[in-house]
Amino acid sequence: MSANNKAIEIRDLHYSYPDGTQALRDINLDVLKGESVGIIGPNGAGKSTLLLHLNGILRGSGKIKVMGTEIQDSTLPLVRSRIGLVFQDPDNQLFMPTVFDDVAFGPINMMLPKKEVDAFVKQALAQVGMSDAIERTSHHLSFGEKKRVSIASVLSMRPDILVLDEPSSNLDPKGRKELIALLKGINKTKIIASHDLELVTALCSRYIFLDKGALVKENSTPQDLADLF
Ligand SMILES: Nc1ncnc2c1ncn2[C@@H]1O[C@H](COP(=O)(O)OP(=O)(O)O)[C@@H](O)[C@H]1O
Ligand SMILES: [Mg+2]
């Protein structure tokens, strides 16, 4: 298998929070381009901590490559344009006055010309079914709408890899079903951390099980998953 098949390579990753909590222990993981991988495990397993390493928000010891580029201070802007992280709580993602501003934030930071910014924003909002909300105030949207706009705010950078932390949390059954359909339609490498087994099995082709900061089972089957909880 050649190295350029890999969207993500994680080698010997360890991380402890400043208070001493050891949150990740010796994680080794490859995600291939085009794969959808589910990261599952109980609360406190280290799922969010792991995702925060993928775009360098947290920096543990060990090595992480994103689309062949190792995460270092000097590569952070490049890495963050290739991998888009959707936070669990959309209120942590949306901070601009309008939906347009939130979804345009990434492309503007990428120094794209205004015409392209507009085109990227429109396409991202169309992908999540929120085109009509372009001029609305982000913090007036419903939770489900905010979730969609937060996904658009990442898609607008046209990343190769989409990373989602607990995407279905706090959604009602209808919103959850719509979200699953929406994510199914996005043709990118996906990494999804969740304890929503139904969502993960609907969207992912491979499952990684984390417990107490360690990767305890790779390549779980849906039946393995059902047995774990
Ligand atoms: N900011 C923080 N400071 C100290 N410990 C933290 C912090 N955030 C998370 N942790 C701890 O790190 C571990 C992993 O947490 P987290 O990655 O949030 O797990 P998960 O997303 O699987 O629920 C837990 O023990 C949690 O209490
Ligand atoms: Mg979490």
Image (tube, rainbow, N blue to C red):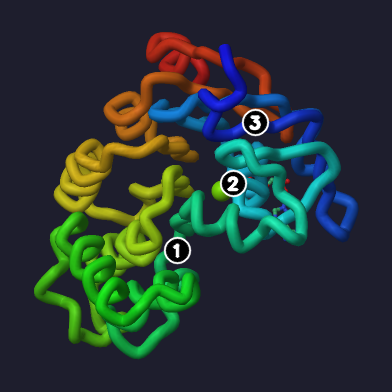
- Kindly state the secondary structure of the residue where label 2 is placed: helix
Q: Residue at x 81, y 44 (%)?
A: 15
Q: Nearer the viewer, mark 3 or mark 1?
A: 3
The yes-or-no answer for disc 2 within 8 Å of ligand 1 is yes
Q: Earlier in the sequence, mark 3 or mark 1?
A: 3
Outermost residue, left side? 132
Residue under pointer 2:
51
> x, y percentage for residue 78?
59, 57
Q: Nearer the viewer, mark 2 or mark 1?
A: 2
> x, y percentage for residue 50?
65, 43
Residue 9: image tag: 3
Q: Residue at x 48, y 22 (%)?
A: 207
Q: Is residue 141 left or right of residue 157?
A: left
Crowdedness near tag 2: few (<14), some (14–19) or many (≥20) residues, C-alpha within 10 Å: many
Snapshot quadrant of residue 205: top left
Q: Residue at x 51, y 18 (%)?
A: 228
Residue under pointer 1:
89
Outermost residue, right side? 20
Crowdedness near tag 1: few (<14), some (14–19) or many (≥20) residues, C-alpha within 10 Å: some
* 219 w.r.t. 87: above or below: above
Q: Is residue 26 left or right of residue 52?
A: right
